[in-house]
Image (tube, rainbow, N blue to C red):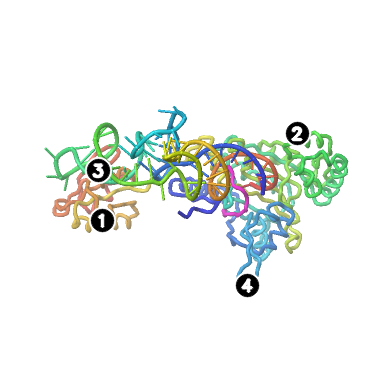
Amino acid sequence: MITAPKGTIDITPKDVYKWQYVENLLRKITAGFNFKEIRTPVFEHTELFQRGVGDTTDVVSKEMYTFIDKADRSITLRPEGTAGVVRSFLQNGMFADAQPTKLYYIIPCYRYEKPQAGRLREFRQFGVEMFGSYEPSADADVISLVKLILNKLGVKDITLNINNIGCPKCRSEYNKKLIECLEAKKDKLCPTCQERLYKNPMRIFDCKSEICQELIKDAPKMFDSVCDDCKDHFDKVLKYLDAMEIAYNIDKGIVRGLDYYTKTVFEFVSNSIGAQGTVCGGGRYDNLVEELGGKPCAGIGFAMGIERLLLVMENTGIEIPEEETCDIFVAALGENADFKAAKIVADLRTAGIKAEKDHLARSLKAQMKFADKIKAKYTVVLGDNEIENNKVTVKNMKTGEQQETSIENIANMLEI
RNA sequence: GUGGGUAUGGCACAGUUGGUUAGCGCAUCAGUUUGUGGCACUGAGGGUCGUCGGUUCGAAUCCGACUACCCACCCCA
């Protein structure tokens, strides 16, 4: 048997209503913030991600689905959403629109990773990007969107962690300082951290090894080393969050793994879904637009893993309502009645009623059983007698109550 | 890429120190006097016990290899 490729899942009718519920809610709330949907290609030129996300990052250097197409172009399935949206923002001249430009998307992304709880190779993200504002209120706007979404979904046990990782100028100075501080003790660091030291030294703060934690305990924090501009920006972001009564936890250890982030970075984390607890991650990226060939333009956004969001909801007992799909089932006795049933069902559907009939030439009893299984609200039995006298009985499946009427009047008997 | 765990009908599982036709629940289908669902009862279909090889008179059960899935590291959403 051929099975779905490793790290992919089928979203079957058993679950799809949950996705639809969440997606509808995301669209509605986000539209209320004046974000507009954008749809960009699933694949892009590989170079876009190398330049945008950074070719030394893990995501780009070892997790991309890259292939050469028939005309010798290097193509990559998008591992994240931001780079493609920035490309589109530039290509379509959206910088000339009234600013800020507020965009959102719900897309599948692809990363060649080893699957585990909350981590797939094909996964779906909901994300937003806001271009054109360097102001702290933009940071707060975007964060408050996540907060509202979680509130509306009824998600409780997710905390907002936030940090300030400065601008390229103060960060490179800081990295130098940090490397200097740790170089002497380099040999004592774990193998991964020895690698991190030159590649992304700030990551060492995230290491789970107690030895590394001990070694880095007294090292300077990025948070305390940012320039005045960056510090001022961050302080104001927090003031906006305070003003909107959004609780946060300053986590000086947060380091995003994508190169483009500057100043504000944040994540919403749950402890109910295993090791991959980051449901939403984002931050500011004031240099990315320029990096990808545009004029300098501020940006801020986030991405939310929809699978992870649904996991949190499931694990914390949030029930998602399933939509009813059948108002009335028309059961037929014999071939002749079945022709008539087809016509009745067609008319009911034209009138906007969710109607269904049998398609397996089943006995009446089996048809009724099926009607029950698909949760039909009403049933009608159609035999030669009913057709001859134009008299049918509409049965309410919940109460068992029955009412006589003519075939033409069936629709009016239903309380939907 | 590195660890650990699991692998029995569609799904969730049982299978006792290796012993004759591999079980249960749910689901599916049919029936319980033939034109009516939900409950109950009866019955039916459906598994080469992940794959290959080995030990043995005999293997779902022991051994080995492979594969798949799950969890964790790493990384991130």
Q: Residue at x 47, y 41 (%)?
A: A320
**Secondary element at image label 4:** loop
Neighbour tally class for label 3: few under 14, some 14-19, many 20 plus, Cα within 10 Å:
many
Q: Quote the CA–CA distance across marks 4 and 2.
A: 51 Å
**Span colored in magenta:** A106-117
Magenta-colored stretch includes residue A110 = yes
Task: Identify the element where label 2 is drawn.
Answer: helix
What is the three-letter code of the residue carrying label 2? Glu
Residue at mark 1: A344
Residue that carries the numbered disc 4 in the rendered image? A71
| Of the image marks 4 and 1, the number of the one nearer the N terminus | 4
- Percent x, y of residue B59: 43, 40
In this view, the residue in front, A137 or B34, is B34
Measuring from the top left, give residue B21's x and y in whole percent: 33, 40
Please name the residue that numbered disc 2 is placed on: A210
Q: Quadrant of residue A265?
A: top right
Q: Secondary structure at mark 1?
A: helix
Q: Position of residue A235 (x, y in %)?
A: 77, 41
Are both tags, 2 and 1, on one chain?
yes
- Which label belongs to residue A84? none
Look at mark 3 in the image and give the residue it sits on: A395
